[in-house]
Image (cartoon, rainbow, N blue to C red):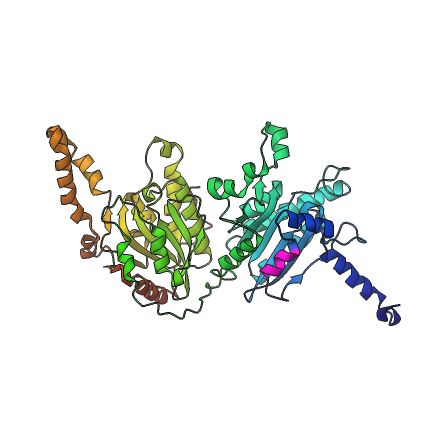
Amino acid sequence: MSEHEKTGFADIDNLHHKRDIARQGGGPEKIKRQHDRGKLTARERLDLLFDKDTFCEVGILGAEDVEKPDADGVIAGYGKINGRYAGLVSYDYTVKGGSMGEVGEIKATRIREIALKSRFPMIWIMDSGGARIDAKTGFGASDDTDRVALFAYTGHLFKEEALMSGVIPLVGAMMGPGFAGTAYIPGLSDFVPMVKDKSFMGLAGPALVKEVIGEDISENDLGGSKVHCEVSGVGDLEVEDDAACIQAIKDYLSFFPANCDQKPPRQDYRGDPTALIDDKILEIIPEHTRQAYNMHRVIKMIADDGIFFEIKPKWGKNMITGFGRVGGYPLGIIANNPMSYGGVIDINASDKATRFIWTCDAFNIPLLFLSDVPGFMIGSMAEKSGIIRHGAKLIHAVAEATVPKFTIIVRKSYGAGYYAMCGKAFDPDLIVAWPKGEISVMGAEGMVSIFGKKMLAAAPEEERANIAAGMTEMIKPLLNVKMAAAKAYIDDVIDPRETRRVLFKALEFTKDKKIFRHPRKHGVYPV
């Protein structure tokens, strides 16, 4: 007889016993299988994610069978990440394949409600086989009532996640499968990191795809990390393993406030943010406007300690998006990438930048535009794919954003690309240029090919190249940003080494910026 039984509290021993069983998930054999796949268990993941001894679990005794507690394959709760609260729903693949059941979804709903009411970030860790299938009923656990109940709770999930968007940060981390309904959890999230070769998502798994449309395909080829981080753009970051995925979540959230009513946290910075950048920044930009260079080098020389957290690095590579800091202040950075298609803005680049701007604007993160753009993609393929609609989406996002906006014209800024990268008409709080910058409806070469067409056609063929080159050299000085500065179309032309100093001062004076828009329900977005 235990001490508790002697005192009349025998239920306490039973309570702790059931909790211990629930913490074991699917048991040693299934845990070993999880490890053999190169994956951590759901509880090992939360131990890495949350500060020590801060996680509070909700519904640990939840189960289909009261006498067999297994948390119903879902760990739900909240705790602190780097000292700040966040909510968690983590599907446990060792229990019924992490499938979605009625009890588990009731727990998940409870945490969503807590996160929204307490206004702190919500994280889903996906390692789930999707909705729970039962051999007797075909769905759910025991009867039609369970079947309807599960549909009801998953419906709540999608609706509530949509309504939470822009109120609290939402993270959908893919550390295993997430097919069918579970695929919309990351689809509706703000940030979707994916573990390489271990995570998959899709509206149907390989078996159903083969049954319905006859396509025989593997999980990886159907919806693996390479597909979604390089081709579809649903994934935001491909990482090597679970530990790297957990770290990515922590790093991402470090740039964000807990909710839309707060400002992003400023980190301590021991250096001098007003100090000049190293002279090496002067060597990065080539003389010729069509010559490529590495914009990532520019970004890392501007950001505190060279730290840049890139979003969607393998998708829409002609546009760079990600987070950095200047003097400890978080910044959302949007930059054209001359190393990919010359930095032209195509459909994927438009969508990538638009979503990033919306995310930063929702959570009060200032935006830095580094412009070196030849314009939007042109041609029949671009038009048939809807470049006007997608480009309008980006222009809409830049215009609508009310956070502090800073524009640096690094080299060229041509045509509608100038507007998309927050030109003067889009109310940047600071717009400056580096000395090699150009602002124009198009480049000098393009002007010559159009406006000098008749003159070139009339000239002897052997002289046309020299004439075109001479015309180009005559036009180029007229495009230089010094002309724009002389007309006060930009605030200043700066020494590239002064960039951090200028940005830090701009971040300081825009800390309390407020913009009031006309009252409306919402814009009609050209999506």
Image coordinates of residue 93 in percent, x first then y, are 67, 48
Which residue in the rendered view is the most extreme toward the top?
214
Q: Is 162 positioned to the left or the right of 13 in the image?
A: left
Q: Please state which of residues 453 and 49 is positioned toward the viewer in this rendering.
A: 49
Q: Is residue 509 above or below residue 185?
A: below
Which residue in the rendered view is the most extreme toward the front?
36
**Residue drawn at the location 16% of the way across and 32% of the way down:** 453
Q: Please state which of residues 329 and 465 is positioned toward the viewer in this rendering.
A: 465
Q: Is 345 positioned to the left or the right of 97 in the image?
A: left
Image coordinates of residue 440 in percent, x first then y, are 23, 46
Image coordinates of residue 186 in percent, x first then y, are 55, 47
- The magenta segment is 43-50
Image coordinates of residue 71 in percent, x first then y, are 72, 54
Q: Residue 473 magenta-drawn?
A: no
Quadrant into which the C terminus falls: top left
Q: Please state which of residues 15 and 93 is positioned toward the viewer in this rendering.
A: 93
The answer to whether any part of residue 432 appears in the image is no
